[in-house]
Amino acid sequence: MRVAIIGAGPSGLACALELQRQGVKPVIFERFHRTGHPVERVDVLLNLPWHPVKNQLAYLARRYHLQLHPLAPLHTIIMHSPGHRAVIRSRLGYLLYRGRSPLSIENQLAARLTCPVIFETIADPQALAREYDWVVVATGDSKATRQLGLWLEHSRIIIRGALVLGEFEPHTFHVFWDTRFAKHGYGYLAPFDAGRACLYLMVGGITPADMDDYWELFLESKKLHYPVVQTCEMEFHTGRATGHQLGNILLVGNSGGFFSNLFGLGLFPGVISGVLAARAILRGDNYERLIRPLIQRIEQLNELRCKLDKLDNRGLDRLVGILGMPGIKQLIYYSGLDVIPAIQAALTWFDRLTFRPPPAQPRHH
């Protein structure tokens, strides 16, 4: 059986390792000259969105034979709105290294490969589909999916990131909400260690030329003027795939929409989609059926994101205040229960509570 995988990111590598484990050696095509994104960053793996799974790394090892080592456990999340600050402390998840370091998730997976990787190659899925029995698209974006006519666009987000120096708590993740500098996006600060961190801002509905103003307001309003080692900027299309298979072409990871617009939570469902694509190929299973639970959960998380998008700064202040309240905090973060449906219902009520009708128009006589 001949299988081609386009992309040597986590989802593509997870697919390759599952095929390799079952005796099939795929060929991987990667656009960069080596494994890993050129810009180092820290990703967060949150337990909450995937309850009742209590430990996602243990779950990936047990169910999908993917042994991943985190940068650090995540013990504290500090949420910042314009006028409030909430601190959550618990076993909240993990911080993960991304990029070209040997510590990165990509290189942890790549170290176990025995199949060939063809670097510096931009592959065409439809052309490869004529040469291979199966083609798995794992490019980390929606470009190929759009070309296949399987992408439903939600929004375009401009992302700016910086590697910064300073003094940081190695187990703490900061998230910043403020419509003045993020609109309905967010900023975050995640540490590599006590002396380095990555600082990111995601803003939708703007052009790349607008980002300077939003970035400066972000840094100034939150007093985040750290020494900068490296910066990057990219454009990301959020949305969903209307289908995940076209003939002998399968879509995994970001290419298949296996991410949530809520904090960009894509690593966990993305690598699972890669393994499930391999199992569909090996066993002749229906890929759409295998991934249905993942898609349903992602749709729930995206609905939650849409409700958050309706909040102005006044609503964000109220929300952060409520999320930090004793009792609420224990239920959401400490109980281990699947509270996402309850949070959705609460946000619907909250949206009605914070809705302010437009002012009445003056009458003309």
Image (cartoon, grey):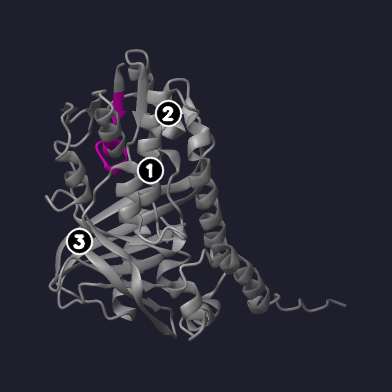
x, y percent for residue 69: 21, 55
Say which residue appears at 15% left-offset and 48% top-offset.
100
x, y percent for residue 123: 28, 25
- Sequence-wise first label, 2 or 3: 3
Identify the image quadrant of the N terminus: top left
Say which residue appears at 29% left-offset and 39% top-offset.
14
Examine the rendering and report whether any part of residue 178 can be seen.
no
- From the image, tell me which residue sits under label 1: 272
Say which residue appears at 47% left-offset and 27% top-offset.
285
User: What distance separates the C-alpha of mark 2 from that of mark 3?
Assistant: 31 Å
SS at mark 2? helix
User: What distance separates the C-alpha of mark 2 from that of mark 1?
Assistant: 12 Å
Query: What amino acid does circle 2 point to?
Result: Ala
x, y percent for residue 134: 37, 21
Residue 280 tag number: 2
Q: Is residue 145 magenta?
A: no
x, y percent for residue 129: 37, 18
- From the image, tell me which residue sits under label 3: 71
SS at mark 3? loop
